[in-house]
Amino acid sequence: MQFSKMFVLNMGMLITIAYLASVFYKYIVIRTSSRVKQISSVLLLIFAGWISTVFGFQLTDEVVFDLRYVPLIIAVLTYRQPYSVVLIGVGIGLSRLTFGITDATLAAVINMSMLGVICAGLNIWMRRSNYRLIIKGILVTLIVNVINSINIAIVGVIPAPYFFSHIMPYTLPTGIVLSLVFAFILRDFQNEQNRIVLIQSTNRLLSVQKEELQKAQIVLEDRAKQLMIASQYKSEFLANMSHELRTPLNSVINFAQMISENADTMDQEDIVRFATMIDHSGQELLTLINDILDLSKVEAGRLDIVLEDISIAQLTEDVMSHFQLVAEKKGIVLVMERKKGVPETLWSDPQRVQQILRNLMSNAIKFTPQGKVQLTVSTEQSNKLSRPGRWLVFAVKDTGIGISEDQFESIFEAFQQADGSISRKFGGTGLGLSISRDLARLLDGNIQLESVEGKGSTFRLYLPLNREKMG
């Protein structure tokens, strides 16, 4: 009976250690690396085996009976590395030496080392076997208890006949029962720990998903605002377009009707004047239609670029002469400056380069009530643009109304102007800068803006000088 009582005391100590280990793992070890967790668990099982020996039943001064092999059973059931099981067996055996080196302690070292090797084999069998876990657990418990009893009889200091007749009938069944009980208790601890880990993992996943949903909500709200703004701009655009298209179209119709109805009574001078107004209105109408068509072609990726050598001097002269009369009527001074180092020719699309420059010059004159508009041509070596290299720079600088910094991006969007009221005051559709930016990109260039509200703006068109000629 003394064996059974002491084994129950051993079991109580093992359960206490298991509980404390579970708490220690939950609050400390779980935050460490997998290697630290592995080492900690091995040391813990060795310590549990040593504690079993401390509280074992001392038959003589040297011989102690205990459940030190139970941690090995747990290792077989839970570990995936057989070498760890061997380490635990050898470690528990060596811990017996802390009680002194005697024949009994040496026998204990041999017994636990042999059990460690056998349990490593059982560990490999468990992972390859198709039996249910409960069946495998019972078989492992029976095998370890039986082999432990046989080892004690063979390598122990107690005579085998005495051991088989007076000790094993108590220790073997008690050890089997208590081993099974402890294994199931520890399994329940492990399942509970797995549930805790699963809950923590699920909470972290839910937290991440919540953050992603919040970010997605912010993005959706931002897009909704952008759509609302775009809708507002398009509504303003349609209103402006209605006015812009009707004005020249009505002029064409009215003047043509006046000529047709009064051709017999009108002077030749009046007919020429009305015809000139018709031509001017028709050109305005054609420009608006071309802007809309160009924008749709760019967005559809169907705008053709035709590259050839462009005379820079001729290009700038044509642009300046085109706006000379308009500038004079507004009292604006037009200035042209060509810096040193500017080449004679540029390999690009002359129609599209001229279209960009005309848009920039037209805007500069339109939004400059008084002062001057200057076109400067220079070269620049820059690594800040879309690609490093040498660039030809057309800078259009005005002394007009300027643009606030928070509107730098929006004015390049289709249908948008710095202020919706500007279209009513100055006219225009808000397509010019959007088309110019897209054309510049098609030419491998870029448009940059510097402006101070109330003090004027500078638009710079960058075109590559090192572009390879094709054909």
Image: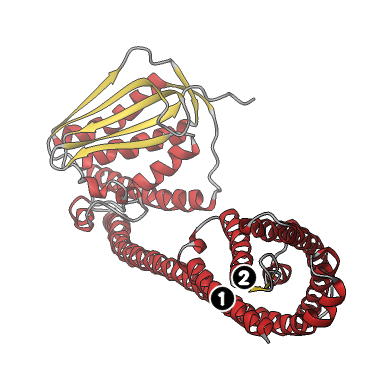
Residue at 42% x, 32% y: name it: 385
Residue 427 relative to residue 170: left or right? left
Instruction: Inspect this view and state whether residue 30 appears.
Output: yes
Dot 1 alpha-carbon crowd within 10 angstroms: few under 14, some 14 to 19, many 20 or more: some
Q: What's under tag 1, amino acid-wise?
A: Met
Q: Position of residue 449 (x, y in %)?
A: 29, 37
Question: What colour-coding does the image apply?
Answer: secondary structure
| Residue contact at pointers 2 and 1, CB within 8 angstroms | yes
Front residue (pair 23, 383): 23
Residue at 34% x, 27% y: name it: 394
Quadrant in which the C terminus is drawn? top right
Residue 182 relative to residue 245: left or right? right
Q: Is residue 357 above or below residue 47?
A: above
Quadrant in which the N terminus is drawn? bottom right
Label 1 element class: helix
Q: In this view, which residue lies farthest toward the front? A: 61
Label 2 element class: helix
Q: Position of residue 193 (x, y in %)?
A: 55, 74
Q: Position of residue 379 (x, y in %)?
A: 37, 20
Residue 170 relative to residue 276: left or right? right
Q: Which mark is residue 13?
A: 1
Q: Is residue 188 above or below residue 210?
A: below
Residue at 72% x, 63% y: name it: 80
Q: Position of residue 376 (x, y in %)?
A: 29, 24
Report how far apart the C-alphas of labels 2 and 1 lie in the structure: 7 Å
Q: In this view, which residue lies farthest toward the bottom? A: 1
Q: What's under tag 2, amino acid-wise?
A: Ser
Q: Is residue 83 above or below residue 169?
A: above
Front residue (pair 257, 376): 376
Q: Which residue is mark 2?
A: 52
The earlier-in-sequence mark between 2 and 1 is: 1
